[in-house]
Image: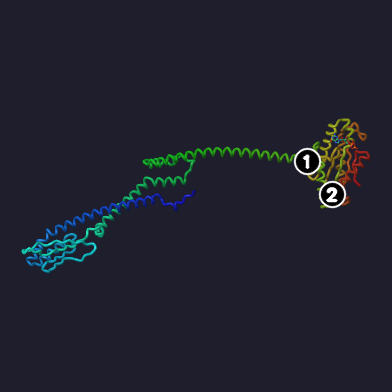
């Protein structure tokens, strides 16, 4: 629900309008009543005036006529005209004379009355006097300035009372509501409820404001409590998320290391720790392509321990394993350039892939290795070749002289050389043709 201050009139302007309306009605009613009373009083006054006119003027007028003193007659008529409410006097004498003072025309707002003059000595009526006076009507009263002034006074009084009432309402209620509204805009449930203490002090005499204050304090403290609860829950959630994130990170790290381990295992020979056949095949393909592309050299040796079967049979399989491990260590020590690759192809067969080596350099190194292996003087005990454990080597080299067409071709050449070395008596190195 949205609130638009422009769409609804403020309480102050509505209060002002209502009070002004009520005040106007009261002013009109009381003014009308007063006007009515004024009109009645005026009518009574006029009637009294008109009733006193014959008593005051009939006899003097008769005398002035009898003594034929027209100036006196005129004077008396003007004197009548000067009386309140009289605006015309007409004296009709029976002998035909006529005296007039003021206006004798009848209009809507005028009334008239008549009285006769006393009889003359011959017992005749001397004449009659017609008095035109104003009508004592409401309209007449209203046409008087005094009536308007009275009405204006009433209206002014009402306006003053309305203004005073608006000020009182504003001071007692509206300004508190305005301040309350301003405070509500910047309402912060995390602050203590004393924020609205001013309502208690200033609106202390108003039970409604106090009630409102208590209601706000209640809402405030409830929201504060709720906020605290939610804050705690949020903290607990954050801690839980952090804990789960840490667990997830640890699991990810463990998974990553497992992957690395698996990847290493998939490329490593378990017994010797050298590269396995798969890794060797990849490296051979890669280095062969490089040598072809760069027209560089690549030497490949296949090494096979001699008569391992009888060694196993004599010393046991575990001793055979140990022998394989020792030979692997020797190989790894001798060929440790970044580009060298030493692998166990399977069983008692090993391989050395030596990028950049010509056949002669490789041969020299491998011959030295073969010598050193025998020089370890590991007794065989069952070899028809030697008292010691020995190794046979087949060597093939890729280069301009021997441009093998494929990695398999190179490997096959090395294998054939090994075969020749075995058949030539073992414990030797044979070069591929
Ligand atoms: N201890 C051990 N022996 C193995 C392993 N792999 C293969 N061998 C043995 O190596 C022997 C290979 O025998 P052969 O192929 O007849 O060859 P050899 O006896 O070494 O004779 P030549 O290779 O002809 O000199 C077998 O007895 C296998 O059991 C291994 O991982 N550990």
Residue at figure coordinates x 41%, y 51% from the top left:
10
Farthest left residue in view: 121
C-alpha span from label 2 to label 1: 28 Å
Q: Which residue is mark 1?
A: 266
Residue at figure coordinates x 17%, y 61% from the top left:
113
Farthest front residue in view: 123
Q: Which residue is mark 2?
A: 297
Which of the 4 image quadrants contains residue 331?
A: top right
**Percent of width and height locating residue 313:** 88, 31
Farthest bottom residue in view: 96
Q: For the residues labelled 2 and 1, say whether their Cβ atoms are less than 8 Å apart.
A: no
Give the number of the mark in front: 2 or 1. Answer: 1
How busy is the neighbourhood of tag 1: few (under 14 within 10 Å), some, or many (20 plus)? some
Circle 1: element type: helix
Q: Is mark 1 within 8 Å of ligand 1?
A: no
Q: Earlier in the sequence, mark 2 or mark 1?
A: 1
Farthest right residue in view: 424
- Judge left or right: residue 421 versus residue 28: right
Q: Considering depth in this image, is 65 or 182 the residue closer to the camera? A: 65
**Quadrant of the picture in which ligand 1 is shown:** top right
- Judge left or right: residue 177 versus residue 82: right
Which of the 4 image quadrants contains residue 66?
A: bottom left
Q: Considering depth in this image, is 179 or 354 the residue closer to the camera? A: 179
Circle 2: element type: loop
**Above-or-below relation of 154 to 73:** above
**Percent of width and height locating residue 215:** 44, 40
**Percent of width and height locating residue 427:** 90, 38
Residue at figure coordinates x 13%, y 68% from the top left:
98
How busy is the neighbourhood of tag 2: few (under 14 within 10 Å), some, or many (20 plus)? many
Which of the 4 image quadrants contains residue 325?
A: top right
- Judge left or right: residue 10 versus residue 303: left
**Percent of width and height locating residue 262:** 75, 40
């Amino acid at each position: 629900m949205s609130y638009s201050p422009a769409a609804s009139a403020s309480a102050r302007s509505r209060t002002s309008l209502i009070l002004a309306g009520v005040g106007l009605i009261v002013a009109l009613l009381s003014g009308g009543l007063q006007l009515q009373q004024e009109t009645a009083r005026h009518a009574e006054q006029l009637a009294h005036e008109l009733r006193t006119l014959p008593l005051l003027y009939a006899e003097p007028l008769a005398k002035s006529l009898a003594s034929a003193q027209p100036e006196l007659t005129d004077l008396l008529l003007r004197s009548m005209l000067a009386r309140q409410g009289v605006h015309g006097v007409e004296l009709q004498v029976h002998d035909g004379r006529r005296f007039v003072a003021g206006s004798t025309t009848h209009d809507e707002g005028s009334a008239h009355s008549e009285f006769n003059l006393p009889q003359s000595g011959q017992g005749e009526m001397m004449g009659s006097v017609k008095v035109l006076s104003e009508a004592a009507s409401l309209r007449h009263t209203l046409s008087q300035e005094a009536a308007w002034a009275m009405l204006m006074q009433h209206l002014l009084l009402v306006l003053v009372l309305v203004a005073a009432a608006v000020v009182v309402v504003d001071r007692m209620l509206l300004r508190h509501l305005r301040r309350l509204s301003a405070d509500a805009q910047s309402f912060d449930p995390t602050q203590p409820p004393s924020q609205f203490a001013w309502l208690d002090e200033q609106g202390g005499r108003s039970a409604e404001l106090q009630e409102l204050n208590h209601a706000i304090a209640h809402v405030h403290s409830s929201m504060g409590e709720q906020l605290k609860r939610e804050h705690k829950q949020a903290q607990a959630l954050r801690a839980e998320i952090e804990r789960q994130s840490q667990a997830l990170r640890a699991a990810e790290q463990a998974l990553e290391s497992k992957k690395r381990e698996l990847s290493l295992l998939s490329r490593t020979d378990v017994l010797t720790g050298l590269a396995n056949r798969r890794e060797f095949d990849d490296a051979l393909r890669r280095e062969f392509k490089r040598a072809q592309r760069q027209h560089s050299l690549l030497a490949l040796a296949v090494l096979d321990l001699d008569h391992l079967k009888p060694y196993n049979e004599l010393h046991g399989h575990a001793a055979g394993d140990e022998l394989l491990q020792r030979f692997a260590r020797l190989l790894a020590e001798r060929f440790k350039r970044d580009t060298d690759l030493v692998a166990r192809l399977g069983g008692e067969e090993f391989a050395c892939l030596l990028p950049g080596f010509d056949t002669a350099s490789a041969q020299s190194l491998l011959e030295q290795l073969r010598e050193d292996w025998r020089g370890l003087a590991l007794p065989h005990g069952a070899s028809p070749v030697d008292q010691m454990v020995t190794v046979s080597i087949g060597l093939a080299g890729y280069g301009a002289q021997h441009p093998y067409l494929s990695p398999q071709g190179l490997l096959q050449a090395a294998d054939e050389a090994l075969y020749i070395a075995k058949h030539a008596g073992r414990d030797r190195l044979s070069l591929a043709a």
